[in-house]
Image (tube, rainbow, N blue to C red):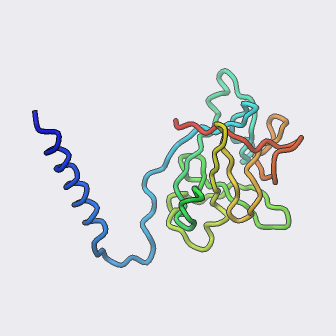
Amino acid sequence: MACPGRRLRYLMALFLCGFCSEAGASPVQQKPAAQSKVFKYRLWDVAQKTLYLRNEQLVAGYLQGPNSELEEKISWVPSRSFEREKFPVILGIQDGHRSLACGTGALPALQLEDVNITELSRGGEDTARFTFFRSYKDGMWRFESAANPGWLLCTATQSNEPLGLATGPDDEHIVDFYFQQC
C-alpha cells in the first residue's frame, strides 16, 4: 500500500498540472464555448403542483397516475453573463431545447422560446431575459428574473394555470419551489 503522504503529493501534482494547463494561453475565441453539461431537475411548488405542457404553455398542476408521465423536467445551465455569487441559471424544458424567457414590457410575462439553453450559456447581451438568479432558504428555492429585478418565477395558487412571474408570494401566487436532481 502506498504511503498516504506520497499519494497526496501525487494527487496535488496532478491537480496543479491540470490547473496550470487550463490557465495557460489558449487560442482566442470570439465567443466562449457553449455549456455542454445540462443539469436536469424536477421543479414543483410548495403546494405540490408539478409542471407540464398544455397548449404550448408551461402549466402547474396536480398530475397523478398515468398523467404523471406528462411532467416536464427543468434543464438548466449556468449563465456566464452574470456574477457567479448570484447563482445565475438559464432554464429550459424538453432537454434544454426550449428556454424560459421573460418579456420586458410594462408587466413582465414568462414565455417559452425555441432557443437551446446550451447556446445561451455563452453569454451576450440578450441572455438577461433567459437568466434567473437562484436563491435558497429553508429548503426552498426562488428564481428571480435577471431582466426584471424583483420579479420571481411563480405558479398560481389555482391548479392548471400557467407558470408566470410575480413580485412575491400573495393570495394568488406561489414563489417557493422544491428543486431536485433527476
115 or 167, which lies in front? 167
99 or 25, which lies in front? 25
Q: How many marks?
A: 0
Q: Toward which corner of the image does residue 25 lie, by quadrant?
A: bottom left
Image height check: is 64 above or below 172? above
What residue lies at 52% left-to-right and 57% top-to-bottom?
A: 78
What residue lies at 52% left-to-right and 65% top-to-bottom?
A: 80
What residue lies at 19% left-to-right and 55% top-to-bottom?
A: 13
Q: Is residue 91 left or right of 103 when viewed as pictured?
A: left
Image height check: is 138 above or below 24? above
Q: Is residue 163 left or right of 74 when viewed as pictured?
A: right
What residue lies at 81% left-to-right and 67% top-to-bottom?
A: 105
Residue that extends furthest to the top in the rendered view of this protein? 65
Residue that extends furthest to the right in the rendered view of this protein? 171
- Which percent across, then down, holds residue 66? 65, 23
7 or 116, which lies in front? 7
- Which percent across, then down, holds residue 95? 53, 47
- Which percent across, then down, holds residue 64? 69, 23
Residue that extends furthest to the left in the rendered view of this protein? 1
- Which percent across, then down, holds residue 107? 84, 62
Q: Quadrant of the N terminus?
A: top left
